[in-house]
Image: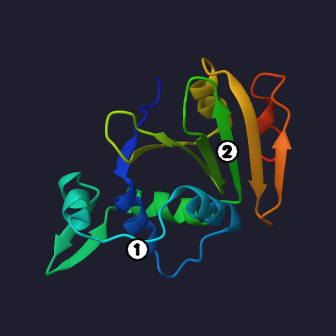
Amino acid sequence: MNSVKASYILEVFEMLFLIGSAADLTPSLPTQYLINQYLPDNFSPQDVEEGLVNKRLAKKTNGNITLEPVVDLLVRSALSSDTIWVVKCGGIDEPVFVLKADDIFLHIMRYPHISNAWKITPYKNKETLLGEFDVMAISEVRRVNKHGEQRFLDTDEKNRWIEGDAK
């Protein structure tokens, strides 16, 4: 039986709110790279909570917002990631991101149907994740490791760029 693939569509302010919701975690260096390079410096939380509740990603009780367990897991996984790949593909203006945490890969890309929104898809293993890149012409891959070291990777062989750091 094939597994079900679930994606989450989040506007940039919702992403910033979720990152801030895990105040007990300091973003890893790969996550900090993503935040610094591709997300705005500040935001107003107007309507963010209601949007998350309407999408059933959070609950609001007695004025407090509580993330659904799967969303909390994804946020914590993203914040503790040990590697990020920034993948530039032909035909796509914005890069595609792959974050790797302990037991999960997060595929993150701009969502074309909503301005300022991102599509986040979790994957359990790299083989399934790499299916996302089967039809893309990869032109450049930058890897940022857990120490913040950046390296451009060879894109000559199909999907070989993810080898080495991923299990």
Instruction: Name which quarter of the figure residue 144 lies in.
Output: bottom right
Residue tagged by mark 2?
Answer: 86
Q: Secondary structure at mark 1?
A: helix
Image coordinates of residue 111 in percent, x first then y, are 40, 38
Q: Position of residue 59 (x, y in %)?
A: 22, 66
Q: Earlier in the sequence, mark 1 or mark 2?
A: 1
Outermost residue toward the top in this view: 135
Q: Secondary structure at mark 2?
A: strand
- Residue 145 vs residue 18: left or right? right
Report the front residue among 34 and 21.
34
Q: Which residue is at 60% across, 17% downward? A: 135
In this orientation, does residue 164 appear?
Answer: no
Q: Residue at x 36, y 50 (%)?
A: 10
Residue bearing the label numbered 1: 21
Which of the 4 image quadrants contains residue 95? top right
Amino acid, disc 1: Ser
In the rendered image, residue 125, in percent from the top left (x then y), is placed at 63, 39
Indicate whether 24 appears above or below 7.
Answer: below
